[in-house]
Image (cartoon, rainbow, N blue to C red):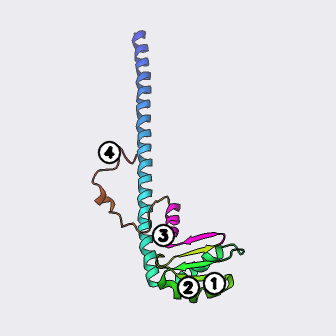
Amino acid sequence: YRDGLAALEGFKQSFASQTTAQVGALLASFGDELAGLQQDMARTLAIAATQLARRIVRSEINTRPELIAHVAQEALDTLLLSAKHITLRVHPDDHALVAQGAAEVLQARGARLLADASMARGGCLVESDIGVIDASVETRWRRAAAALGIDEPWDAAPAAAPAERSSKPVGSDGEGS
């Protein structure tokens, strides 16, 4: 009888430790899967935010083109005061807006303002003897998107909605976890 009780107690301890290990592995798996889902959700949210921001920025460039004068002033202000031979390049449609809105800064810095058809509207490029400041919309966009951990180019087409991308559940192909 004692041998039977000892064997039963040994079996219970073995079963308990085995069950504990299996439950621990299951919880760890759930934790890993949850962390993967949270990362996927965060990335999807960041992508949606950048797509919305792109639409807003494009709308602002179209409805309030005079904002380019502020961008040009900021770009010129980032140059060291010792910079010489300063040239500010803007899109031809932005030339008059910058000439009027940033006239004081251009004159104070002795900067030359040029219309450059290769520049996109809403951005500018400052060249001087000590360096170049790229304040183009594309470059500013790339920096802002990178701060969110997204590699989303300015001219990217809107991505398909998550439901349109794939009908497979997350993790069914081994990705996302």
> Could you say which quadrant of the image residue 101 lies in?
bottom right
Pointer 4 residue: 173
Q: Check disc 2 and give the amino acid type.
A: Val
Question: Crowding near pointer 3: few (<14 within 10 Å), some, many (20+)?
Answer: some
Whether residues under marks 4 and 2 lie with C-beta atoms below 8 angstroms apart, the answer is no
Secondary structure type for disc 2: helix
**Magenta span:** 129-146
Residue at the spot x=61%, y=88% of the render? 103
Query: Which label lies toward us, 3 or 4?
Result: 3
Q: Which mark is residue 48?
A: none
Q: Is residue 159 left or right of residue 62?
A: left
Residue at the spot x=44%, y=22% of the render? 13
Q: Is residue 5 left or right of residue 135?
A: left
Distance from Cα at disc 1 to Cα at disc 2: 9 Å
Residue 88 pos. (x, y %): 58, 79
Pointer 2 residue: 98
Whether residues under marks 1 and 2 lie with C-beta atoms below 8 angstroms apart, the answer is yes
Whether residues under marks 1 and 3 lie with C-beta atoms below 8 angstroms apart, the answer is no
Mark yes or no: residue 64 visible: no
Q: Which mark is residue 106?
A: 1
Q: Which of the marked residues, 4 or 2, is nearer the chain's N terminus?
A: 2
